[in-house]
Image (cartoon, rainbow, N blue to C red):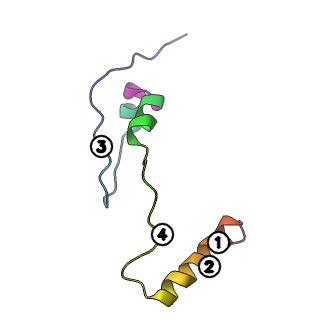
Amino acid sequence: MKTTKHIEDPIPPMKKGQLNIYKPSDIKRWGAERFFEETAIREPFLLEFPEFTEDENRRMDELLAVSDRGTV
């Protein structure tokens, strides 16, 4: 059975407002558990979009509620 040696080099942090791409080989090298612990978002997601009007925000909330039920 082959074991994976985990390397303790730093994992680049996720950047807010940008796409973050990690290669599967890097995740394997760092170890999946360590990778998810270090890159997990700990703050709540802001569900209000400042550029939307009040009506657009209300409609977005309705659509999100419907999609959470799995009907969209």
Helix, strand, or loop for circle 3? loop
> Dot 4, crowdedness within 10 Å: few (<14), some or many (≥20)?
few
Query: What's drawn in magenta, residue-wise?
Result: 28-32
Q: CA distance from mark 1 to mark 3?
A: 31 Å
The residue identified by callout 2 is 62
Is residue 30 magenta-colored? yes
Residue drawn at the location 46% of the way across and 57% of the way down: 44
Quadrant of the rendered image containing residue 17: bottom left
Q: Secondary structure at mark 4?
A: loop
Residue that carries the numbered disc 3 in the rendered image = 13
At horizontal 48% and vertical 69% (from top left) the residue drawn is 47
Q: Which residue: 48% across, 13% down?
A: 3
Are discs 2 and 1 less than 8 Å apart at CB?
yes
Distance of label 2 from label 3 (alpha carbons): 33 Å
Q: Nearer the viewer, mark 2 or mark 3?
A: 2
Q: Are marks 2 and 3 in contact (CB under 8 Å)?
A: no
How crowded pointer 1 is (Cα within 10 Å; few <14, some 14-19, many 20+) is rated as: few
Crowding at label 3, few (<14), some or many (≥20) Cα neighbours within 10 Å?
Answer: few
Tell me the number on the disc at residue 17. none
| Mark 4 or mark 2, earlier in chain | 4
Dominant SS type (magenta): helix
Q: Is residue 63 left or right of residue 22?
A: right
Residue 65: numbered disc = 1
